Amino acid sequence: MSEFDEAERLIWAGRAEAFRDSFAKLCARTAPLLLDAAAVGPGTRVLDVGTGSGTVAATACGRGARVSAVDAEPGMVELARRAAPEADVRVAVLPDLPSAPGTFDAEVANFVVNHVGRPAEALAALRAATRPGGRVAATIWCSPVGVGHELLEQAVAEAGAARPADMPRLDPADDFPRTAEGFAALLESAGLEAASCEQIAWDHVAPPEEWWSGAAAGVGLIGQTVSRQDPETVVRIKDAYNRIASKHAGPDGRLVLRYHALLASGPTPA
Ligand SMILES: C[S@@+](CC[C@H](N)C(=O)[O-])C[C@H]1O[C@@H](n2cnc3c(N)ncnc32)[C@H](O)[C@@H]1O
C-alpha cells in the first residue's frame, strides 16, 4: 500500500458518523447524476465502491437496482448496511475488489478516486469487475474544491496553522489534471474507451455548526488539518471560522457554499 493510502486509512478510521452528519450531505448531491451516468435502473447489478455512509447505494436500491457496495473503513460499512439494508455491503480496499471479472453491469465511485494513491489502478479495477458493454462512472472534486473548503482553509491560515507535515501528497507520477479533459483521459487510460466528463456546480446549504463539525472531527484532509492542532490553535481556527462563515450565510443563517465536481463515465469495451 502506498504512503498516501496508509494515511487515507487513518483519516477515515472511526469517523463514519462524523462524515455521515457533515460532508456526506455535500457528496449526496451527485448521487442521482452518477447513477444516471452509469445507466442504473431496475434490475441493474451495480457496485458502489467507497460507499461511505451508503448514500449512493441507498439511492440505487430506491431505483430497484441489485446493489453491492464496498468501503475500506469498517465503520462506513456498518452505516451503509443501515442506510441500504437490501444491499450486500462489505469491507474492501481498492484496487482489490472481491468480485470476479465482469460481475456487474455498472460500477460507481462517488468522490473516492480523489482518495486513492493510484487513481488509474483504482479505475482499472472498477472496469475489470464490470461486464463488457457495462458502464463505469465516477466523481471527483475540481481544484480548488469549493467554497466550504476554502472557508476552512482561510480560517486555518488566519489562525497561523498549516497542514500537518506528515500528510503525504499524491505522487506526481500518479496524479492527473483535475479538469474534465484530465479526468476523462484518466478513465481512458484505465481502459474505458470513449469516456466523457462533465462539470457540475451547485450550492451546498448547511448550518455553520454542521459544516464545522466534520472538520472538527477530523474528516478528510481539511479535517485533519483542523483537528490535529493543539487545543488553543483549534479555538483560534474556530473563531476565525465563525467570522469568515458569517460572510457566506444566507437570510436564514445557513451557509451557502458553491461547489464544483467532475462526473466522468464510459462504457467498458464490448
Ligand atoms: C469522500 S468519502 C465518499 C463516500 C460516499 N461515496 C459518498 O458519496 O458519500 C470517501 C470514501 O472512500 C472510502 N475509501 C477511500 N479509499 C478507499 C479505498 N482504497 N478503497 C475503498 N474505499 C476507500 C473512504 O473510506 C470513504 O468512505
Image (cartoon, rainbow, N blue to C red):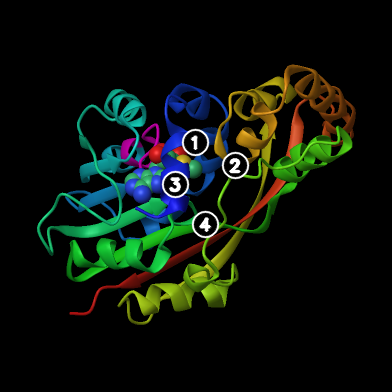
> Mark 1 sits on what residue?
11
Distance of mark 1 from mark 3, alpha carbons?
23 Å
Q: Within 8 Å: ligand 1 and the Cβ of disc 1?
A: no
Query: Callout 2: few (<14), some (14-19), or many (20+) C-alpha neighbours within 10 Å?
Result: some
Q: Which residues are magenta?
A: 51-58
Distance from mark 3 CB to nearest ligand 1 atom below 8 Å: yes
Left or right: where 24 falls relative to 166: left
Compute the Cα span from label 2 to label 4.
15 Å
Q: Are marks 2 and 4 in contact (CB under 8 Å)?
A: no
Q: CA distance from mark 3 to mark 4?
A: 12 Å
Residue placed under numbered mark 3 in the picture: 31
Do labels 1 and 2 touch, CB within 8 Å? Answer: yes
Q: The residue under label 3 is which amino acid type?
A: Ala
Instruction: Check residue 140 in the rendering and tell me which mark sits there, or answer none.
Output: 4
Q: Earlier in the sequence, mark 4 or mark 1?
A: 1
Callout 4–callout 1 Cβ contact below 8 Å: no
Quarter of the image for residue 51 reads: top left
Q: Which residue is mark 2?
A: 221
Report the amino acid beneath label 1.
Answer: Ile
Q: Position of residue 146 (x, y in %)?
A: 70, 49
Residue 262 or residue 253, whichever sits in front: 262
